[in-house]
Amino acid sequence: LAKTTQPISMDSYEGQEVNITCSHNNIATNDYITWYQQFPSQGPRFIIQGYKTKVTNEVASLFIPADRKSSTLSLPRVSLSDTAVYYCLVGEGNTGKLIFGQGTTLQVKP
Amino acid sequence: GAVVSQHPSRVICKSGTSVKIECRSLDFQATTMFWYRQFPKQSLMLMATSNEGSKATYEQGVEKDKFLINHASLTLSTLTVTSAHPEDSSFYICSAGFRPPRGTDTQYFGPGTRLTVL
């Protein structure tokens, strides 16, 4: 069962780039890394997913080193509305189960 | 695409009654559906994995007779909280696994259902 470790909280200011790093030392060969964003009283929202190297979409980038034991979510130019909890998850092989850790609470200040 | 809905969004019930929560994948057929619950200021806790046409697989410590899961089709899963008690009050969230033409299964989450048991 691959577990993840993230910082409990981070602060940033509007317009800055935010990088959240996640450790997953026991990631399995067929596991993907997925990041979600959650606002209070809402379901998690898919942000980005990757297997190795770098993935970029319209909202974020995901950097994964060759050993895949960690990953970094990069949010360019954050705004106040990016204040949320961010979860890094590693898919449990073929079952697809996701075990949530505590996540990182990002507070964006004006 | 990959939209998941839940109904109801919020429910208040009396202790001892049963409550059914529906989870639907609106624009795709889900390979698998999952049920989570989340207490205030805490992370999501996986309760069970649901596959169409078969019995749900419950996580350790989750009472299957208390939380009945039915997965009638590739787009619908229901969670019934039987004989609800105040300690069952929580935020229940479902997710559905979507497999794009290229790539791996990705879970998309519903908006959640707030259950309050009086």
Image (tube, coloured by chain):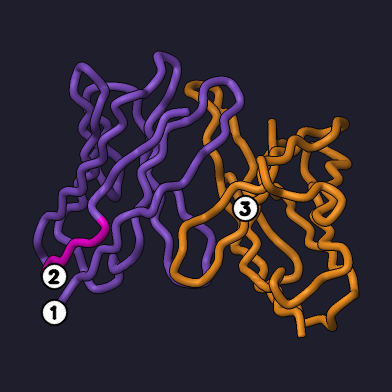
User: Chain A shown in which color?
Assistant: purple
SS for dot 1: loop
Residue position for label 2: A14
Q: CA distance from mark 1 to mark 3?
A: 34 Å
SS for dot 3: strand
Q: Residue at x 9, y 61 (%)?
A: A16
In magenta, the rendered stretch is A8-13
Q: CA distance from mark 2 to mark 3?
A: 32 Å
> Three-letter amino acid code at disc 2?
Glu
Q: Is residue A41 left or right of residue B72?
A: left
Residue under mark 1: which chain is it in? A
> Three-letter amino acid code at disc 1?
Pro
Residue position for label 3: B36
Q: Quadrant of the C terminus of chain B?
A: bottom right
Residue B27 seen in the current view? no
Measured from the top left, where is residue B92 in percent x and y? 65, 62
User: A83 or A9, which lies in front?
Assistant: A9
Hey, which quadrant is residue A65 in on the image?
top left
Q: Is residue B20 magenta?
A: no
